[in-house]
């Protein structure tokens, strides 16, 4: 029986993931600040066939609350199999309009919230010699779209952290999967913090325009875990865009080396 903790599980992708594991008969800890929505997720998971579902109030900006939650799962379940660091917020706008407070808010939740989740549960996973982190990043952390600088940087940090831990923790049989979705149907815009009216108008339309739902991505994440993947990119167009970016970077690197070698030979 799988024991899984999901931050931000009261709605959106977090709820979809909770339901996906519930359908597999898992025990699910719904961790969120919103108790009303969290209890809705709990009820839905029980209807979907979960072995056990519980709600825990968890603020991902608090080290102490993560430690308390880690202690709780030790006592209640005797361990944990999967931690999904999913809680996040939306923000952005043109660079000059993003304040230092906006940067702190974004990084504290979207990046350091993931760091705290990994730090709190790595000791337990090492004791067990098993465990799985699922860190929800974004294609924004790979492709860096305009008018989203603080969001891009936070999500790029999640990618970097996840790629580091995938190698560093592997000797203890601890796996790390980073998930990089593009826009999909969710309520992320509810948390949007921006001073840019264009951003306020654009984000809901982009989310609604996607033909991929949170449930689709959740099922894809479980399949990626089953395969042992270290990165999952749900959107085909985003995968193609990333491949093109990597090819362009590689082409530039090769040309740079050619020119650098020519310059070096003239200096000799």
Image (spheres, rainbow, N blue to C red):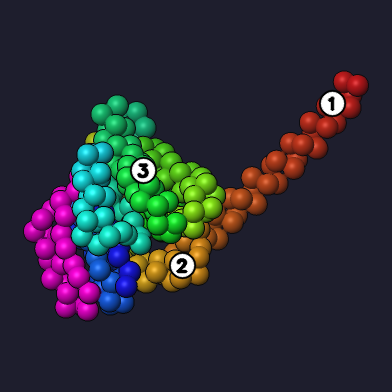
58 left or right of 258 in image: left
Q: How many marks?
A: 3
Circle 3 SS class: helix
Instruction: Please say whether residue 253 is visible from this viewpoint.
Output: yes
Residue indicated by mark 2? 224
- Look at discs 1 and 3 and give the one toward the viewer: 3
Give the image quarter of residue 235: bottom left
Return the x and y of residue 4 as percentages of the image width and height: 30, 63
Magenta stretch? 33-61
Instruction: Please say whether residue 142 is visible from this viewpoint.
Output: no
Circle 1 SS class: helix
Depicted 215 relative to depicted 253: above or below: below
* Camera-nearest residue between 232 and 247: 232
- Sequence-wise, the earlier of marks 1 and 3 is 3
Return the x and y of residue 156 as percentages of the image width and height: 45, 43
Residue indicated by mark 1? 264
187 left or right of 134 in image: left
Circles 3 and 2: CB distance less than 8 Å? no
Quadrant containing the N terminus is bottom left
Give the alpha-carbon distance from disc 1 to disc 3, as whole Å: 46 Å
Circles 2 and 1: CB distance less than 8 Å? no
Q: Return the residue found at the far top.
A: 267
- The mark found on residue 119 in the picture is 3
Return the x and y of residue 57 as percentages of the image width and height: 15, 51
Q: Return the residue found at the far left.
A: 36
- Look at discs 3 and 2 and give the one toward the viewer: 3
- Sequence-wise, the earlier of marks 3 and 2 is 3
Circles 1 and 3: CB distance less than 8 Å? no
């Amino acid at each position: 029986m799988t024991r899984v903790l999901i931050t931000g599980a009261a709605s959106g992708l977090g709820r979809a993931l909770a339901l996906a594991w519930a359908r597999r008969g898992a025990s699910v800890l719904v961790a969120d600040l919103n108790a009303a929505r969290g209890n809705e997720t709990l009820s839905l998971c029980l209807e979907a066939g979960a072995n056990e579902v519980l709600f825990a109030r968890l603020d991902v900006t608090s080290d102490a609350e993560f430690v308390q939650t880690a202690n709780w799962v030790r006592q209640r379940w005797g361990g944990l199999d999967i931690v999904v660091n999913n809680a996040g917020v939306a923000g952005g706008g043109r660079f000059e309009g993003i304040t230092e407070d906006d940067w702190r808010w974004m990084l504290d939740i979207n990046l350091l919230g993931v760091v705290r989740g990994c730090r709190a549960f790595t000791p337990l996973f090492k004791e067990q010699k098993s465990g799985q982190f699922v860190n929800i990043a974004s294609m924004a952390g790979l492709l860096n779209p305009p008018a989203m600088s603080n969001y891009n940087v936070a999500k790029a940090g999640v990618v970097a952290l996840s790629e580091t831990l995938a190698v560093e923790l592997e000797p203890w049989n601890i796996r790390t999967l980073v998930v990089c979705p593009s826009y999909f149907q969710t309520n992320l815009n509810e948390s949007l913090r921006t001073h840019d009216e264009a951003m306020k108008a654009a984000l809901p339309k982009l989310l609604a325009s996607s033909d991929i739902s949170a449930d689709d991505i959740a099922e894809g994440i479980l399949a990626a875990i089953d395969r042992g993947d270290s990165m999952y990119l749900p959107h085909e167009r985003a995968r193609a865009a990333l491949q093109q970016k990597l090819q362009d970077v590689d082409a530039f690197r090769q040309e740079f080396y050619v020119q650098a070698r020519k310059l070096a030979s003239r200096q000799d």
